[in-house]
């Protein structure tokens, strides 16, 4: 039986990495084989691409360059890690996936959400997740949280992050796999809603 593919999405500062780690711990506690990975990155080649994408010195990078670099990192991750793991019955929990590219480069970068989804789903034929837990949070609240880095993406400002959030919510309206979770609550309450969503796909 193939593993389940669970993606955690949201704007910077929404708590994705913390939730992804807790999902992994919960699945392992239940005795399931589980692997955690992230985007961009997750492979040696992908981590090199990640460094290019997040380096604040690369401020001249245009949205279409971002799009194809993210897709290149993702193609390596899907082929090298995600698809083989799922086929072996291992659950995969991924911190970001092509929904982020659709929200950041597609919506906020104005490449267009349909363009991103076409590349991801029709051309590259990336694995589709069983669940996308979208942690929804006001960008102004997110920016006040600790741990926000000053990398190239996060330095684009509040208005950019607002466009990203709007893009995520547009994706949620068109894709039944996306479950919107209110992230402006105590961490345990947020995780409980995520856990319930995970239960429905197991």
Image (cartoon, rainbow, N blue to C red):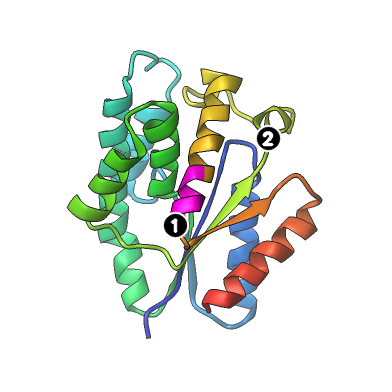
Residue denoted by label 2: 138
Where is residue 74? Give x, y as percent: 31, 48
Residue 161 horizontal/vertical position (percent): 56, 28
Question: Residue 112 occupies which quadrant of the picture?
Answer: top left
Identify the residue under disc 1: 175
**What label sits on residue 46 in the rendered view?**
none
Label 2 and label 1: CA atoms lie apart by 21 Å
Q: Secondary structure at mark 2?
A: loop
The residue located at (57%, 76%) in the rendering is 200
On screen, 159 above or below 87? above
- Residue 131 shown left or right of residue 16 in the figure: left
Mark 1, secondary structure of its residue: loop
What is the quadrant of residue 194 in the picture?
A: bottom right
Above or below residue 131? Residue 183 is above
**Magenta stretch in the rendered image:** 170-174
| Residue 38 part of the magenta segment | no
In the picture, which quadrant includes the N terminus? bottom left
Mark 1: give few (<14), some (14-19) or many (20+) Cα within 10 Å: few
* Residue farthest along the bottom direction in this orientation: 1
Decide if residue 40 is on the left or right side of residue 19: left
């Amino acid at each position: 039986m193939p593993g389940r593919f669970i993606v955690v999405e949201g704007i910077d500062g929404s708590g994705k990495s913390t939730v992804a780690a807790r999902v992994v711990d919960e699945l392992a506690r239940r005795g399931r084989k589980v692997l955690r990975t992230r985007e961009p990155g997750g492979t040696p080649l992908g981590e090199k691409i990640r460094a290019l994408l997040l380096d604040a010195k690369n401020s001249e990078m245009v949205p279409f360059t971002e799009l194809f670099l993210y897709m290149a990192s993702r193609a390596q991750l899907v082929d090298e890690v995600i698809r083989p793991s799922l086929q072996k019955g291992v659950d995969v929990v991924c911190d970001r996936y092509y929904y982020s590219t659709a929200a950041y480069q597609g919506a906020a970068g104005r490449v267009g959400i349909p363009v991103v989804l076409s590349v991801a789903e029709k051309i590259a034929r990336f694995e589709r997740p069983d669940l996308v837990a979208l942690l929804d949070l006001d960008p102004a609240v997110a920016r006040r949280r600790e741990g926000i880095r000053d990398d190239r993406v996060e330095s684009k400002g509040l208005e950019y992050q607002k466009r990203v959030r709007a893009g995520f919510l547009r994706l949620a309206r068109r894709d039944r796999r996306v479950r919107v979770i209110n992230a402006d609550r105590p961490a345990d309450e947020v995780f409980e809603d995520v856990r319930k969503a995970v239960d429905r796909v197991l």
